[in-house]
Image (cartoon, helix red, strand yellow):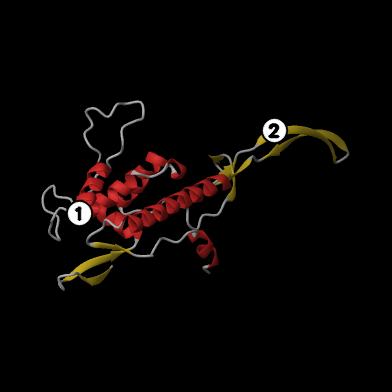
Amino acid sequence: MSIQRQIGRTGVSKVKRALGVQGALEWAFRVEQAQLELPPPKDVTEEGFGFGLEYVLLQRAMLGCKVDGGQHKMGSYTHPDAEVIAATVAGMPDSLGGIRMAIQVAELARAGLTPDWMPGVVPRCVPMGIKNNQHGERATTILVGTERVKTRGKWRTVEVLACPVTWRPHPEQIASARRGYEDWWRALYWVRVGLLAGGMLQEVEVTAATPRVQPWLNDAKTP
């Protein structure tokens, strides 16, 4: 995290904390404990729900005012910038996953985590079953047919056995995990663009820093 200073019209130096979008989300949800206020379902009337956080923030911006607060969290106070970030996440468009993605972004930030894209995992061909006997651990086999073979001048019928195998983890599992990571990355990028376009953050400066787009490509190059 870096600190930037901006000089206002009064000539007073104002300190702004510079954070990448992931850092800003973690600060809002993990440190400031901002709550994700989602809109009510479309088939439910707005009566009884009160004004949404986005509405309040927009009205505050139109009035040109903001809530003053200190640098440290006290009691149930949530920094206004954290509320702005939470409201932005709550507006996640359906094209990026909507409410489901908004919840995922918020909960991952609250836990300080990144989606598991299964780093270093390589599919391996393994037996579908293992059994233990007096000879140790062996793969299970199944009967797939019989064959007639001639041994020592006599014809005998012998069983043909096969060991069923599978891929673990399945390549589709890895591909699915990485598609999920890319969806999350696109959501974070949308949040970053929205925060910059909105211009409502007072004490946080969102930088260009973002998580790696496809970290498994870099991971594959690592010896």
- Residue appearing at x 28%, y 66% in the figure: 18
Quadrant housing the N terminus: bottom left
- With 117 as the anchor, is 199 left or right in this view? left
Q: Amino acid at mark 2?
A: Leu
12 or 180, nearer to the observer:
12
Q: How many marks?
A: 2
Mark 2, secondary structure of its residue:
strand
Q: Position of residue 57 (x, y in %)?
A: 24, 47
Q: Quadrant of residue 21?
A: bottom left
Q: Position of residue 24 (x, y in %)?
A: 30, 58
Mark 1, secondary structure of its residue:
loop
- Residue appearing at x 45%, y 61% in the figure: 212
| Tag nearer the camera, 1 or 2 | 1
- Residue appearing at x 15%, y 61% in the figure: 71
Tell me the crowding category of disc 2: few under 14, some 14 to 19, or many 20 or more residues within 10 angstroms, Cα based: few
97 or 60, nearer to the observer:
60
71 or 129, nearer to the observer:
71
Residue 218: tell me if it is visible. yes
Q: Give residue 143's mark.
A: 2
User: Is 221 situated above or below 65?
Assistant: below
Residue that carries the numbered disc 1 in the rendered image: 64
Q: Position of residue 95 (x, y in %)?
A: 46, 43
Residue extending farthest right: 153
- With 36 as the anchor, is 8 left or right in this view? left
Q: Position of residue 129 (x, y in %)?
A: 57, 39
Q: Earlier in the sequence, mark 1 or mark 2?
A: 1
Disc 1 vs disc 2: Cβ atoms closer than 8 Å?
no
Tell me the crowding category of disc 1: few under 14, some 14 to 19, or many 20 or more residues within 10 angstroms, Cα based: few
Q: Amino acid at mark 1?
A: Gly
Residue 29: tell me if it is visible. no
11 or 22, nearer to the observer:
11
Disc 1/disc 2 C-alpha distance (Å): 78 Å
